[in-house]
Image (spheres, helix red, strand yellow):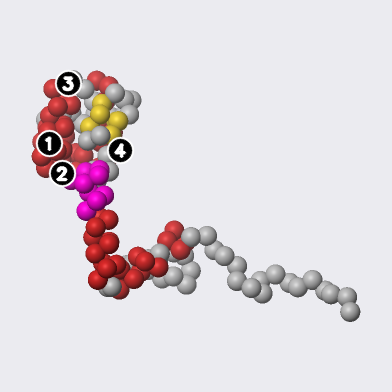
Amino acid sequence: MARIAGVVIPSDKQVHIGLTYIYGIGPKVAKDILTAANVEPTTRVKDLTEAEEARLRDVISANHLVEGDLQRITANNVKRLKDVGTYRGLRHKAGLPTRGQRTRTNARTRKGRAVAVGGAQPKAASKT
């Protein structure tokens, strides 16, 4: 079981896929890391030697922001936008899309589950 940047990489995956389990590393960056570390992308994580794991750790720690550091920087950027009171900061505060998407329909990921507003159900007939 390989542990890189504080993340346990699944043993049965190929290395170029396994690296994407680390926050901040996608497919393109994973291939760049493997090229820099001189590791074959299609080898399984369980078949990596200690030297190869060490090279991967060194390349990632030297050249890339990952996991906690990257999340902290992202959170600080959003907090700064909120504190300054920019339009994007206000959208973050309200839990709405920040990049100009429509909100009349769609946008459910940011807005949450749709809640029915009064008058949606037919009233029960009352006896007089």
Report which residue position mark 2 lands on: 64
Residue under the image location 28 percent in, 73 percent down: 85
Distance of mark 2 from mark 1, alpha carbons?
8 Å
Quadrant for residue 39, please give it: top left
Q: Do the residues under discs 2 and 1 have CB atoms within 8 angstroms?
A: yes
- Classify 10 Å Cα crowding around label 3: few (below 14), some (14-19), many (20 and above): few
Q: Do the residues under discs 3 and 2 have CB atoms within 8 angstroms?
A: no
Residue under the image location 48 percent in, 69 percent down: 105
Q: Which amino acid does label 1 sit on?
A: Val
Quick check: 85 above or below 24?
A: below
Distance of mark 1 from mark 3, alpha carbons?
14 Å
- In the rendered image, residue 4, in percent from the top left (x then y), is placed at 22, 32
Q: Is mark 4 on a helix, strand or loop?
A: helix
Q: Which amino acid does label 4 sit on?
A: Tyr
Going from the N terminus, do you reach mark 4 or mark 3 first?
4
Q: What element carries label 2?
A: loop
Q: Do the residues under discs 1 and 3 have CB atoms within 8 angstroms?
A: no
